[in-house]
Image (tube, grey):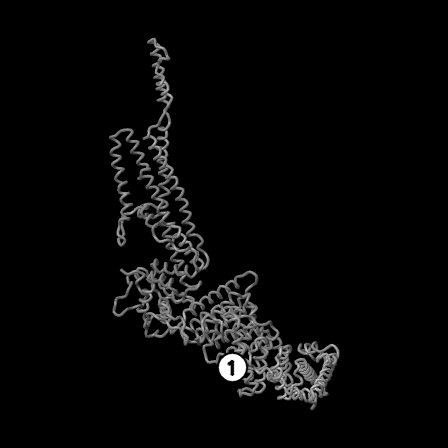
Amino acid sequence: MSDAHTQPPEGLTVGTQPRWGEASTKRNPAIHVIQDEFDEYGAEFGERARVWKAYVREADMSDMEQVDEWHNEKQINNRSLDVILLFGVLFTIVCTPFAVQSSSLLTPNLSDVSVAQLGVITEILRGIADGSRPSELNSTQTANVGMFQPSLVHVWINALWFSSLLLGAAVSIIAILAKEWCILLMSGRVGDSWSQMIRRQQRWEGVEKWKMGQVIIFLPALIHLAVYKEVSFVTGICLYLWTLHLAVAIPALIITAFPILVYGVSTLLPFFNPSDVVCPYSTSISRFIQRLGGPDPECYYKSPNRIAIEALAWLIKTSQDPKSIDTALQAIAGANPNDEHRQLLKESGADTMILRRLIGLDSYSTNYDKLLDLYTRARLFFQPPTTASVSQQGAPTLAGEKVSLSAGEGFQGNINREVQRKMRDLRDMMDRQITTYTATSDHVFRSIPDNVQALRIGSTAASHCLRSMEHETQAHMHEQFDSAIDLLENYKNRQAHLEIRESQYLITGTAILLSSLLDCPPATGAQYVMRLLRIVCRAGDGQNPLPMEQLGLPMAVYALSRHDYPGWTRRPPLSSICRTERSIEMIAYYVSHHSEFANITTSMAKLGLLELLSNPEEYKLDDDDIMILGKASHLLADVAGPARIHTLSENAHIDIYPRAFEVVTKMIQGEHYQLSRDAIATTCLTILNLAQRAYLPPGIPLGEIYVFVIECALDPPRLSLGPEAYEKDIALDVMQKFHDYSWTQDSILDLARALGKKQMFTKFKEALEVESSDNIIMKLFATGQAWFLIDHAIKSETADHEDWTRCLSPFIGDESVPDLVMRRLREQRNILADQYRGVWKNDALHRQIRHSYFQILYNSLPTARIGEGAHN
């Protein structure tokens, strides 16, 4: 006869075998109806999964049956809580008269004492009549009249009956407590299915840990002790009858001895029973002792995942509803596999049941593809992991048995289980946070379509990524990403209203989507990020400005997807799926450590920008892309410095900056790139602006780079037009970074050679001679730079070197005598300082000067003309 644990769902056939479970299906026509509702992909084991509804339903029925069994139904020992309580009360009522009656045997009988006293008086009177003296009467006879000693038999009778009376009362009290325990077990069945499952499973484990069932089952044994053992009521009856008449006592003893013998044998037989045979004869005492000798229950405090796995195993083992079992088996598809969970579910027979359903799945049945996916992933749960968890050349492969199905062959591919686990954990974390956000009382959540869509993208992004990895398709991922971009565009254009938290969840969901979308050609991946950057950098007047820092997560995800930065637990080279895993780990960390996230967003955004700029040809960036990147870097320029990004090492800059500076060096030195001159200049300025001066890699041509920046400040690139043009500001930003740089002896001479090669002092002199006030900013910059470089040459004591005299010739002429050269340079330095002060103190001209670099130059000027000897 089939049961719910062996029969497949409706429509499953195996060759020409008869259909399984026909009888059960007839008994319950609702059984084996294929579910039309399925969980969100990858969320089959999540907090809102339908399996927990089935679990709660089955647990309610099972617990109710168990409590009813404890309360009402007759167990093997024909006792239950209600029976125990009733029997204890009745037994106490019956024992009470016997105990009261027998208590008189322990005290003197007044009638007997009176008779004894009268006998003594009679003897005294008789002696007086015979002429005897009272003193001659037996004194001991008089004394014995006042003494009483209960017999040993009477003492035993009272001890046995009072023990039985008190034991019966104790059992009644404990039975009342047990009924309260049962009520507590069934109480609190409110809330969502996940909460009910956790609460019920913990209570049930408490019942098993503290052996509540054994305690309740042992309660009748106390009654048994009161009735049948040596301290029992019937033993006291036999002793009492023995004192009355032997003929009455002997039949009572025989009748009493028979049940006592049967009870004793039933208690002992299970201990001599072979382990593979169940003895049908037992008592509460024998079962209680056997259970005490069993394995200790596991620790009560367990993780929710462990509790959920135990609940799933319990449901599969105990449920008689095939539909509930199907739901439980399908939920395994979303569980996190490990050896302990795998073994626990194997013990319930889940692996065999899943295989049977896979083999018998009808390709013409409703929801065939969905069921095939669920059972295939559930079957994969039981496959052991590979010996090497991660392949250095590609994604990890799965070892062990494989289910060969024509429609699903290769369906799973090589799936990294660790990525799945981290993705599920991230999904659950996002879901909990969003649920808390919508339910909190510190604000009013507006359930309008835009708000709901933002939260939906944040909540479901991880599930879409799971489906993308397992099905090797990204069509739905593109749709989700497009939806996120459109919503951000609407928010920028004030067509959608999002609260700060809602926009954060939206961008976090976008970052999660990117972690899987970026397994694509480099140019395609770059354009995903550029779409986000355009929204931030092209916000005009009347639009919602989206802070560049909010794109920190997506930008960092992009960087991690393109390059193996040092600091992670796995060694490079990393496969694409390992890079995805790293991104997910980073996102999950900052979702759970939100206080740290605010301090790291700038470094994340800079990391992504530097990655894009480090290989503009491979990423196929055009002039418009370079302009956007430059604008983005300018928006980050005034934000706080670097911080360590999770999964990156403290020294990650050693790997981050050299790649970007290599591009700068090649561009400055004239290597061909398919970009315009302005785009190349903007690329170099953007990289230099993003870089931290303390992390400049050794060996870079710093002199050439500095001269290049001066050229850009004098003649800025013009990628962006109009009043919002920012390229000159970026050049000045970079100049400000290098202002107090500590030049070495060699680097200062390299700078002199680079200045001479580009004839920069000739350009300074030409700018100084321009009379028009239209170019006052350029004139001021040329004055300040000329002063700064001459001052630097003098202070470094290299001004008389031929490299400096050659490049400074526009200011010192053909003078070659060292002393005259130094005198001429000091004079020129003082003249330039006075000219700079003059422009700076002109209020009309000063109002045109906005960049802080000019203030820094002004503060560097000497307060008064310094004599010649001061600089020797």
Q: Is residue 353 left or right of residue 201?
A: left
- Circle 1 SS class: loop
Q: Quadrant of residue 376?
A: bottom left
Instruction: Please tell me how crowded label 1 is: few (under 14), some (14-19), or many (20+) other residues with Cα within 10 Å.
Output: some
Q: Is residue 323 above or below residue 811?
A: above
The kind of residue tagged 1 is Asn
Which residue corresponds to the image point at 50% horizontal and 79% vertical from the top-left?
526
Q: Percent from the top left, x then y, of residue 397?
A: 38, 73
Total numbered badges shown on the rendered structure: 1
Q: Is residue 300 above or below residue 97?
A: below
Q: Is residue 317 left or right of residue 641?
A: left
> In front here: 280 or 729?
729
Q: Quadrant of residue 229?
A: top left
Q: Is residue 370 left or right of residue 432?
A: left
Q: Percent from the top left, x then y, of residue 81?
A: 37, 46
Instruction: Say which residue label 1 marks.
Output: 615
* Quarter placement of the C terminus: bottom right
Q: Is residue 678 above or below residue 144?
A: below
Q: Residue furthest top?
A: 131
> In front here: 853 or 636?
853
Q: Percent from the top left, x then y, of residue 589?
A: 50, 67
Asked if residue 610 can be seen in this view, the reply is yes
Asked if residue 842 can be seen in this view, the reply is no
* Quarter placement of the N terminus: bottom left
Q: Percent from the top left, x then y, of residue 678?
A: 59, 86
